[in-house]
Amino acid sequence: MKEEISARINTMRDYMRSAGIDAVIIPQTDPHQGEYLADHWQVRRWLSGFTGSAGDLVITMSEAFVWADSRYWLQAANQLSGTGIGVMEEGKPEVPSILGYLGTALKPGSTVGIDGMLFSIDKTREMEQELTAHGMKLRVDFNPVDLIWLDRPALPKAEVFVHEQKYAGQTMADKIAAVLANVNAAGADATFISDLAEIAWTLNIRARDVECNPVVTSFLYISPGSSTLFIDADKLNADTGAYLASNGVNVRGYDEVLGFLATLPESQRVLVSSTQSAGALLPALGSRAVVGKSPVAMLKAVKNDVQLDGVRNAMVRDGVALVYSFMEIEDKMAHGERLTEMGVADILLRHRSSQPLFFDLSFGTIAGFGPHGAIVHYSANEESDAVLTPDNLLLVDSGANYLDGTTDITRTITLGNPTNAQRHDFTLVMKGHISLAEAIFPEGTRGAQLDALARINLWKEGLSYLHGTGHGVGHFLNVHEGPQSIRLNDTLAPMTPGMITSNEPGLYREGEYGIRCENLVLTVPAFTTAFGRFYKFETLTLFPFDLRLFDTAIMTDGEIDWVNAYHRMVCERLLPNLDAKAQEWLIEKTKPLTR
């Protein structure tokens, strides 16, 4: 495989040479600027062999590198070894950005090639400006992938279905009206939407086009008179076609987008998101383009009451599945049965898939034992699949998409007798988790202003983690959702009532173990004073933390009280849905934590 990767890179260089391209940037995305990709768009993975969900590949005539963030440093180093592709550990002060590297690796007059549909408007503009400053050119029409990847998978063909209003809580017509109100407020008449989750949300449609993400491969144009969905017509049956038509949505081919935009009336003002729309759309729109923020993102992020009731019910079913899953894991370990990381993932899938309204996992389960737990987005395969033993920690990050909600939970458990160091580290992580869970903050507060709450106890001991503390979560949609997040770098989106966000601080000891503790939280009103409105978090996830890993000597009384109150809530919600044996197990796992 390593030799095959090298051959692919050399073939790409042949096409670069013939086109007068000195460097090419292959991003890990698609024309919808997505994070989770259909196989058709896994170009960087196919070219490099690196399977991480983020990280761009840069190829020059003499070098090749993948820029990988901290989640993937270890994985990238392992997968790229022997391919001739190096790893740029993005985030380290000494590591240059891609454009910074190209500015020194290439000579003035060089040309950098990209597929303009795979870079956002903002990113395309940034590249043009910086490369111009170095005396270089950017070509946005370099896309020889189909000539190199001869057996490239076709675009997804999954059939579209309607996400019923009893789960969505709002009709397509009402959503389109709300979107157009935001469009008008931005000084535009219409909008063109590329983001797959935004299209699925707006039209109340879903499909299985991307693994674990129930989205529909399409583009959407919305205007007051009518709307147009650009999609492979074979994906629609009579019912979904009639549903779209009855709501004034026309259907055109997926590849007709640029031609359609170019023939719109010159007077039409079309809002496009600068971060979610491809730079290649701008030449087609010309003076019609109004570049701004998505008119859908905040509407989608703030869940309605029907959605929130659904999520709370989904959390109960998910918690029940987790109880039976971890009971089975413990039972197998107690009886000395062979159990691997992939076996853990299989157990979780089996119990979740037996729950009502289950659709799919919300992402591939991360089950990392011992040192593998220190690889933040570890994915077990046949070669790496570790056998669980009682002498270390097991980190399990998993979730599901139910028709009425999306879940995402991480638990770190001990499989035997934890060391004092493991208990100390776990408790530091939990102190941060609790601090964030208990936060009260004024209206307008952004995630970056809350992030330090989760890190301060680690920082005091010279420890940290490099991933974000929290990401938005969709409703029967993508498990990663904006615009809000809780992280050190600011996304400028205020935490707003109705938003669901993860709370997941961690700590990773390379070669030893990893710890992450994650619940989903809902932003809700707290109170109003003379100083304005204040908000807080309601914890939604329902499953206990491992009592054996707490070091109460370094906990405050308030932190102990929080753990006990959370565990009481878990019991109240889950016990009525469990059989007698599972009830006994859960009661034991949620005994009051004491000093």
Image (cartoon, rainbow, N blue to C red):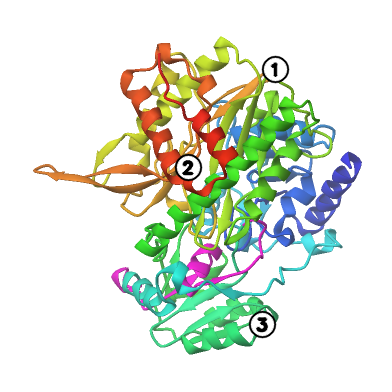
The one nearer the camera, 548 or 69, is: 548
The amino acid on which the numbered mark 1 sits, given as a three-letter code, is Asp
- Position of residue 572 in the picture relative to residue 466 (left or right): left
Q: Helix or strand or loop: what does disc 2 sit on?
A: loop
The amino acid on which the numbered mark 2 sits, given as a three-letter code, is Leu
Query: Which is nearer the N-term, disc 1 or disc 2?
Result: 1
CB within 8 Å, label 1 to label 2: no
Residue 34 in sight: yes
How crowded pointer 2 is (Cα within 10 Å; few <14, some 14-19, many 20+) is rated as many
How crowded pointer 1 is (Cα within 10 Å; few <14, some 14-19, many 20+) is rated as some
Residue 465, position in %: x, y? 52, 27
Which residues make up the magenta segment? 183-212
- Position of residue 333 in the picture relative to residue 137 (left or right): right
Q: Is residue 218 above or below residue 133?
A: below
The one nearer the camera, 438 or 347, is: 347
Q: Which mark is residue 233?
A: 3
Q: Residue at x 69, y 71 (%)?
A: 158
Question: Which residue does the numbered mark 2 point to in the structure image?
Answer: 542
Q: In which quarter of the image is the N terminus?
A: top right
Which quarter of the figure has residue 93? top right
